[in-house]
Amino acid sequence: MIRRSIAVLASVSVPMVALMLGGYQGGLFAQFALYGVATAALALCWGFAGILSLGHAVSFGIGAYVAAWCGINIPEGGTILGILLGGLAAGFVSMLVGLVGLRGRVNVITFALLTFVLLFGAVEVVNQLTPITGGFNGLAGVPSLNLGDLWTADPVSQRVIVTIAAVGLLWSLIVVARSPFGGVLVLAKTHAIRAASSGYNIPAFRIGTFSFAGVVTGLAGALFSTQTQFVAPDQISLALATNFVLWAMIGSRTSLIGSFFTAIVISFITNELADRFLTVWLLAMGIIFIAVVVLIPDGVAEAVLKRLPERWHPRRVVTLTTATEDTSGGGAALEAKAITCVFGKFTAVDDVNFTARGGVHCLIGPNGAGKSTLLNALSGTVPPSNGTWRIGDTDLTKMRPWHMARAGVARKFQTPAIAPELTVAQNLAVARMGVTVHPLALIFTKWRADLTSTAWRILEAGDLVRLLDTPAFRLSHGQRQILELAMTFASRPTLVLLDEPTAGMTAGETASVAEILRTEASALDIPIVVVEHDMALIRSAASAVTVLQAGRVLATGTVEEIENNADVTRAYVGEGH
Amino acid sequence: MDFAFLVDQGLGILATASVSALVAMGLALSFRLMGIINLASGDFMMIGAYSVLTFVAIGLPYVVGVLAACVIGFLLGALTERGLLQRFSRAPELAILGTFGLGIVIRQVVELIYGKNFQFVENPLPGSVEIGGAEFSIYRLVLIGVSVVVIGALLLVLTLTPLGVKVRAVAADGDLAETLGVRSRRLKLVVFAVSTAMASLAGSLIAPLTNVGPGMGNAYLFVMFVVVIVGGARVSMVLVAALAIAIVQNVTTLVVDSLVAKLAILAMAFIVLAASRPSTKGAIV
């Protein structure tokens, strides 16, 4: 409640500042608030989704030029139309860039370069397409906000409306960042495959976020042109793009509010100093840039928050409940046929056939036998070169990881894949909502999820229930393993694929997990495929064991059969035993 | 279209390609090894151009200026790697932002010392020769020759000496390579310094052909970065990309104009990225 009142108070006071400052300063304030919005949009992409754009000024400039052109050339309602078109055009260009650069595994550096060269191209277009853009001179005489003949804003209402719009746009960004949607972005930033295996189409999430940031930035640029009544190549320049990155970095890219206010404050300082000491100012900016990168790479807001007592900025509280048990389903077997994974000249998995029925099915074998590769293939994260597999009547062969998650396939990775910046409860909620909530609805839903009783039992076994509101980066390795295991069982699965789930756990934790897996598999009658080296766990939990060697199936059987199999002994300890 | 015209255009393309290949090859090497791109490459080119300008102005031969450019580029690069980049071996995006800030500092310091105005370096080899009926500037021929020799020498070093294997080992896993006796930190230092030395060399070579000014580097960045996007981190692909982009750029400039040429190579970057497989190993995200 207090948080909300502060938020409302802050939202109202920002336009009040624009009103109270004099004409000149107030106008500047409105302009800089729009820079702040663009900076916050960049921070959403960079700090939350992990996408750095060095060409963020392109979106801002497109918005500004489209709105200016429409405002000048369309007399009736051109301004409003131009603002809307400006936002759309910027979003459209961002979407194209995203479709090219954010489809697969994203290399931050390549994407940053792509946006950088796009900026160079856009600068050329603006400077040379003189008939439309006015070239170096830009476009003068852009009308202020108006509804044709009905109404034209006077300077005071102009800057107040612009500032209110800026606050509104900032809020839209904050809503996305703080919603479970933002949580998915944060999880995908550190562990994209984990997020995809939780039911989220991660490329779509990234492209969507980048496009949305483009729309917001374009709208900010469009409003900017009505405020300055002038648009120039400055609005699509390298300098502006540099500033956006610098402001977001100084203010904290993980804090949209921090980025917003940093942009405003530094813009005012620049405005005071730049004209008087241009060369020295640019030099100082370069030095500040390097200093920030080296000294406070996380930004001022993060540095301040770290020093404040926790009760001043409580972590988001997530409502976690227990799902009503659904005992139907189960009983389906995993049938894999001729799975083959070839990387270049190396065949990691060679024509593997196996069937896993309800129960814990362990995959064992020497290092390099192809166990993890097989699991990656079955979970769709690294599609195999050949082979088909199904669970019951559901063909999984061509499914993407997020489709598989929605079909009930749950996956745990070898090293704990969690979002360190989110709390334990947020991690669990994100893992659950991939199956229950529509991606776009994630923006508007509350942080609330119902976990299976299995997930709760796992959390209890690892004593994590009392740590639900702790940020996950404080957890030990073993606790992270427990957390990810609980995330794997957040929804009721039809097939579970676990890669060395107990590595890093204590003997006690391993025993509890083995017990939970065994009872879970038999109670639900689902296959739980486990890659494991720990014989204690295998003996206590496994109902079947498949031994892989050099990418091929060496033997399949019960634990006893495998332990007495001469071929298997030979594979592990060599000849003569 | 006669033969002389083709020769003239062909040599022009080679001249463009050899300059961008010099810089882009260094970029690709450091991209491969350290996962970063030096956003100040254009400013290292500018440093090379100003080195030549300064040494020629005090009466030393042109060649001395070019050699000095290489040495200065190497030393500044080594300093940058030690002082700035080594802190960010786990955060490549901060490293490239560091080079971005460095670029601004270099530009402004040069502007404080030399002023903002364009300066000119006299062509040390004026005149032209006739090749296949076309008159072609001697200096440009030398530029092509020097670039080819430098690039060839580097390729030989990378393929024939153990250094190439070490580069590949460090690129695959720096920590692992270190345990096998490769001094990966020193290797990264050397490779980055070589990449800035090559940028500086390229800048010193183009100095007589262009306006020398503090902001001159930005004009070249665009093409360099498109070359790296198209070619990726593989040195051989970068050379092919440099040539392909030079062809598109020169031909489009000739047939249409320079704006369309820029947009054409921008489109190339997008098309190549869009057409390439999402990832090398087929992983989805």
Image (cartoon, coloured by chain):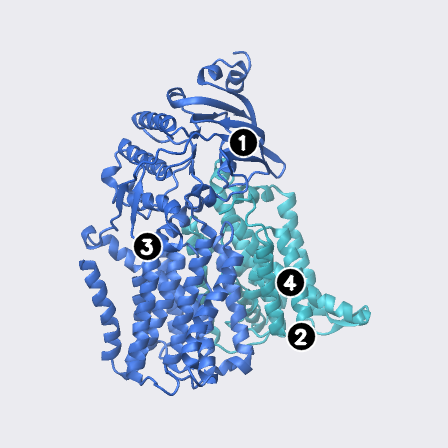
- Depth check, mark 1 against mark 3: the one in front is 1
Q: Which mark is residue B245?
A: 4
Residue under label 1: A336
- Depth check, mark 4 against mark 1: the one in front is 1
Count of all numbered marks drawn on residues in the image = 4
Q: How far apart, in angstroms, are the residues tagged by discs 4 and 1?
A: 47 Å
Q: Is residue A552 above or below residue A267?
A: above
Residue A238 is situated, as x and y percent measured from the top left of the image, at 46, 69
Residue type at numbered disc 4 = Ile
Q: Could you tell me if residue A266 is visible in this image?
A: no
- Depth check, mark 4 against mark 2: the one in front is 2
* Dot 4 and dot 2 within a common chain: yes
Q: Residue at x 60, y 59 (%)?
A: B271
Residue under label 2: B256
What shade does chain B have?
A: cyan
Residue B246: quarter of image = bottom right
- Depth check, mark 3 against mark 2: the one in front is 3
Residue type at numbered disc 2 = Val
**Structural crowding at the residue carrying mark 3, measured as other residues with C-alpha within 10 Å and reported as few (<14), some (14–19) or many (≥20):** some
